[in-house]
Amino acid sequence: MTTLPQTTERKLGLVIDLDTCVGCHACVISCKGWNTENYGAPLSDTDAYGGDPSGTFLNRVHSYEVQPEAGAAQLIHFPKSCLHCEDAPCVTVCPTGASYKRVEDGIVLVNETDCIGCGLCAWACPYGAREMDAVEKVMKKCTLCVDRIYNENLPEEDREPACVRTCPAGARHFGDFADPDSNVSKLTAERGGMELMPEQGTKPVNRYLPPRPKDTIETDQIDILAPYLAPVAEEATGFLGWLDKTLEKL
Amino acid sequence: MPKDQPTIDLSPKVSDEVRKTTCYMCACRCGINVHMKDGEVAYIEGNKDHPVNKGVLCAKGSAGIMQVNAPSRLRAPLKRVGPRGSGEFEEISWDEALEIATDWLAPIRKDDPSKLAFFTGRDQSQSFTSFFAQNFGTPNYAAHGGFCSVNMAAAGIYTMGGAFWEFGQPDWDHTKLFVLFGVAEDHDSNPIKMGIGKIKARGARVVGVNPIRTGYNAVADDWFGITPGTDGLLILSIVHCLMKAGRIDLDYLARFTNAPCFVNGDEKSPEFGLLLRDDAGKELVMDRAAGKLTPFDQKGVKPDLSATYRHAGVTHRTVMHHMAERYLQDEYTPEAVADRVGIPAPRIRALAAEIARTAFEEAFELDQEWTDFRGETHKTMTGRPVSFHSMRGISAHANGFQTCRALHVLQIILGTVEVPGGFRFKPPYPKPATAHPKPHCGVTPAAPLDGPHLGFVHGPDDLALKEDGTPARIDKAFTWENPMSAHGLMHMVISNAHAGDPYKIDTLFMYMANMSWNSSMNTRGVIDMLTDQDEEGEYVIPRIIYSDAYSSEMVAYADLILPDTTYLERHDCISLLDRPICEADAAADAIRWPVIEPDRDVRGFQSVLCDLGARLGLPGFTNEDGSQKYADYGDYIVNHQRKPGIGPLAGWRMSDKGLTNGRGDVNEGQLDSYINNGGFWVGHIPDEALYYKPWNSAYQDWAVELGLFDSPQPYLFSLYVEPMRRFQLAAEGHGDRQPPEHLRARILETMDPLPIWYDPAPDNRAEAYPITALTQRPMAMYHSWGSQNAWLRQLHGHNPLYVPTNLMRLHGLTDGDWARVISPHGEITVPVLEMAALNPNTVWTWNAIGKRKGAWALDEDAPEATRGFLLNHLIHELLPPKGDGLRWSNSDPITGQAAWFDLKVRIEKADAPAESQPSLAPIKSPVGKGPSKLSWKVGK
């Protein structure tokens, strides 16, 4: 049993914009690249060129189809990684203290030297956000790129998680949710940023911006739009007459 | 900090060095920072200064490290020792490989250079490879455009001097409505994602028109799940609505397009249907001010769109008049087209109305003065914030050229091309068809070709025909069968060479094109053609040389393999002479350079051509004393001059006063300058030249100074494409060069100088095969390349057939079942998965995930081979027989573009086979297999 800090000075986390995520997996692979080379053990791949390739990823993109009551079905791309919960059950369940939440910024990390690979934390996480590395036998999870965000060897503009830096659509945002004036707090307020599965009581830090309403071009606007297509003529002769009159005025 | 919270290093060393070069994980060509540790590649990220990607990078780009270490990399030159297709090779030295190639090619060049067919696939060095082919003297050269998106490119060039992607982009900073028609997601990859993110962040509307709601269409605010192949009909219906409502930009049409030009109305004239011109060849318009005919470009002229001109008993009418007569007809009303396009009429009207509202009610002015080619100065620039983008989705149909034309015409009547908020060209575009070369096919033994291979025809005189009227090129490009085939027809080369039609060749030399697998229609048939032997036991295609970096399916079918490097081990240039990476605000070019050295006996293909060209004594590749002119490709990039002062790279050239850009002398330190600047060069366009580029004097002057043109070339957009009418005139019997009888009717019908729509479905036997089958390229994979990448193959390791809910029910299918998919040409058996967000008459799968056993250094039980599949087995290069005794090509009759997306099928539930069918026999791998475990960490 490991304890959580009462509070953290900052609450660092991600805002993920489901209205904009095109499901390209750029974040998935950028994360894999950075975290293979950096924090802790490399993210391994087994049967890498074989029949059942399986690797460790700290971030994956899932896709779900949604069928609204009316209108066409929709496809939502849903990137998922550790949500750095305030009440993180993966921490409290850890028998060795390897799993912990940083008091400075709230990042949930695994101290790999103390991890015995028992897997309890992955079982406790309701989001399925932890993966056991099959080669190293240690638990791997999103570090919010703790080795980037304060890294004085990186230019200041690059001190953000690899997934945020690389996202082509700009669907990922990083910041401090404890600061109401931060970009992530503002985005959450403006766009109705949501917790994932709040009923689990884990108080996740990351927020998801919901997709905006879709397929409204016809239903919402038909009365407004109709005048824009009011005919100036029914056939070519009338059209040319209109053309002549209009050109005179130009 | 609690006592048990460990101390961690928050500032670990990231790398020893960052080497900045250009990505090649797809065709997008982003800038990348390659982080090095101990001389090895540790991490790859986007370059924030780079004009293409501004720091972001897609999954492919970030996975480059797994491409550079892929076990599928070829290791040394290979000579075939078993039968073709067996995969039996022996490794040989480069000297032996180059001697073999020279021994094969030198006699061909001496006797008949056209016996070499040199086709270069997904080549990013076409200005160089075409230079080699031209020096060799063969007319048989092209890259992969013919089986990709030539319809879009050619329709754009002929209509307005450029198309999408490499030619231009939406004005992301100002557009308020972005309409995206079917698009391959790497065309272009990161900039479209960045643009969509940018405009959605400020609340602009994104509309997706696509049978499949994935990717960009998944985030579109409105999705139009159109019936494949009917985009042109939808677009012309929108044109109808806009014209009928007068929601078109008359001032723009009058000033900048050929809408006010007169179409010759004299039915008896050999110029019937051509535009009236003065003696100097300039289009004539009626000047509203003077009330008389005037060349279009005169100072103060106010072209009249609605004029008629009566002369010698004949009435000539304007292009605008012809457009009104055609597009105001009831056949284009939303109600008339709704059933065929699969979108209800009110929804079509809503889209047209939203386009009209945004273009005209949300118009705005930029406070920027500019002067047009007539000398008139405008105080502001008028924005029409509607923009469009499209690529292969609407191109790869037999009606693709006319559909792409329709889309360009739609943009033009809205007045939204080259204005704020609309579509903007990127240098060296705009460049009209008249400013491009014409195709050349003049062959002389032991001498170069008489000019560039590819270009733009303006009438029958420009076709690549021999004196006897037969095709000059092996792919039959620029013939009556497909007169405007501006990118050639790579997909027809093997079948034509096998058939000896139009003639036999000796050596087929290919680069980076997986023709025995996913890059060919009729894969099984192509394999048979590559291995077919004549009565003497000789291969029907006698010799095949192939260059690839990886163990692709094609390797087994070549006699000699020239192994290429990976993209981090080579020089390249992303050149203004080639497929550029410019921005609407700037000219730009870039390089690749060897950030690591190969650990295998491989060489960059372009450097190999420098060597081979010298061995063959090609004039462009040898010095006067016969010695090799360019030591390697890097040497060529710096020292080659296409004409005085113009080389492959525009940045950091040399002048009397020191370094200069654009035109300038060779600078031996040029590559170092590029490397020091992050691998690229950018030259900004002045503010007064940023919009209205085809007509903007300041832009034209800037382009001349940079070396893009030799003189200002303002021109009118061609709503009416006169060269098409010249082919119709020939089909009507005018002129000396006459089409064969069986093609007259089709030329008359399809080469309409105003956009038309025709239905490709009946030719594909839609009555018996009612479902369209499509492929899409995943954002995380590039053609066949991704499967060798240990990270990317975990994202897309196999490819189910996605089937709409209604068809799943109809055929009693549930997820995980298998279905037989049957086309007029063939049959496959594949796993299915239900998808609701899909046109109800369309099935689809991911492109090029299916792999042949033995290829790409994968195990034989790889899911790519056991559950993956290709639709290519269902597609033939010829249409099903029509009963007229002829076989017609499965391609656009105007450009020859492969009509991949016209595929019609039916499906039925099947018993689950052990593996996807057909399952071809494994090929022997020339590289062995990869390791089973990967824990890739290069730093200590």
Image (tube, helix red, strand yellow):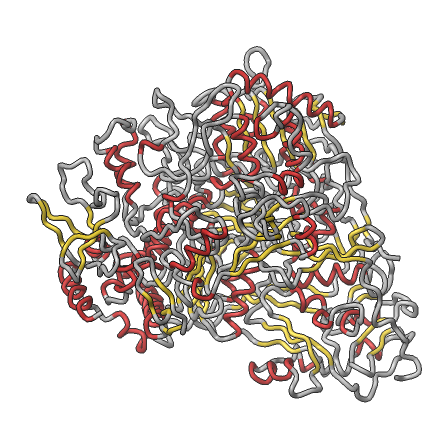
In the rendered image, is residue B750 in sight?
Answer: yes
Quadrant of the frame with the C terminus of chain A: bottom left
Relative to B576, B892 lies left or right: left
Count of numbered labels shown in the rendering: 0
Displayed quadrant of residue B333 = bottom left
Is residue B290 toward the left or the right of residue B501 in the image? left
Residue farthest toward the front in the current orientation of the protein: B656
Residue B597 versus residue B684: which sits nearer the camera? B684
In this rendering, does residue B210 appear at all? Answer: no
**B15 lies above or below B598:** below
On the image, the x and y values in percent for residue A198 come to 67, 82
- Residue B62 pos. (x, y %): 69, 56
Give whichever of B247, B700 is nearer the camera. B700
Residue B156 vertical position relative to residue A115 in the rendered view, above or below = above
The residue at 80%/76% (across/down) is A108
Left or right, residue B521 beside residue B369? right
**Image location (x, y in percent) of residue A221:** 35, 76
Horizontal arrangement in the rendering, residue B807 relative to residue B433 (left or right): right
Point out the residue furthest to the left here.
B313
Q: Vertically, is B703 above or below B603?
A: below
Q: Position of residue A175 (x, y in %)?
A: 69, 79
**Looking at the rendering, in which quadrant would you find the N terminus of chain A?**
bottom right
Is residue B424 or residue B91 the one in the foreground? Answer: B424
Residues B437 and B809: in front is B437
Q: Quadrant of residue B389?
A: bottom left
What residue lies at 28% left-to-right and 49% top-to-bottom?
A: B720
Query: Residue at position x 75%, y 59% from top?
Result: A33
Image point 55% across, 60% down: which residue? B191
